[in-house]
Amino acid sequence: DLAQDASGTDLAIAKVSAPATPRLAIARRQAELSEEVYTLGFPLLPAPERVRNGNLVFHDVNRRFLRGYVTKTGEVELPGASKVDAIEVDMLVPPGLSGAPLLRSGTLEVVGVLFGNHSSYSIEAVSSVDPSTGISTPEVRSQVCFGLAHQTEYLWNARVPALGSNTLAQYSS
C-alpha cells in the first residue's frame, strides 16, 4: 500500500512486508543544531544529451554517502513557496536523492527525509562606479547552498490509507 501524506507534504508512506533484518528507526527526538548527520542513496542521474523516443535516458546510478551537520531547524523560506518546517544541513542533496533518510551520525536512526536544497548569499562588495573614470565595479556575492529535510514529526503525524488512516505514531504503538 502506498499513499501520499494527507497534510500536503511531498512524503509518501508505504506499508510493505519484509523479513526482520537490521532496519532504520524513526527518531522520536528531533535533530539538534550542529548535530552530525549522514545520508545514503542511489540517485538516478539523467543524461540530458541522450533522449530516446522523447524520454530521457538514465544511464548512471551513483551510490552516494554524504555527511555533514545540522545548521538550522525550524522554518525555512523557499523562493516562490511558503515557509516550511525543515532541517537545514551543510550538504547538497543531489537531484534524485529526495526521499533518502537523514540519519543521526553513528546510528540507523532517521531524523529527517531529504527533499531538496536552498541557498542564501551575502554581499561581499557593493557595486560602485568610479566617478573619475566611469568604470563600474559589479557587486560581489558569496553564495552558500544547503540541503533540506522534513522533520520526523511529519512522518509520525502522517495519516494515510496504507496505515488504515491512522498516523504512523498510532500504527506503530
Image: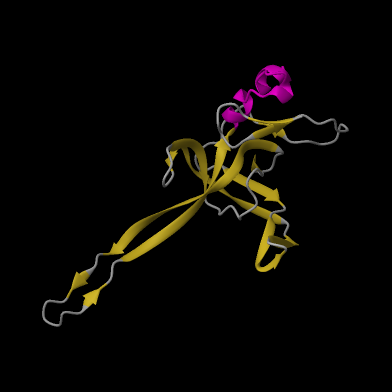
The vertical placement of 57 against 166, above or below, is below
Which quarter shows the C terminus? top right
Left or right: 152 with respect to 78? right
The vertical placement of 165 against 112, above or below, is above
The part of the chain drawn in magenta is 152-173
Q: Position of residue 86 (x, y in %)?
A: 51, 38
In the picture, residue 11 is in which quadrant? top right
Q: Position of residue 32 (x, y in %)?
A: 53, 36
66 or 55: nearer the eye?
55
Left or right: 79 with respect to 128? right
Identified at 41% across, 45% down, the residue is 80
Identified at 35% across, 63% down, the residue is 141
The residue most toward the bottom is 133
In the picture, residue 135 is in which quadrant? bottom left
- Chief secondary structure of the magenta portion: helix
69 or 82: nearer the eye?
82
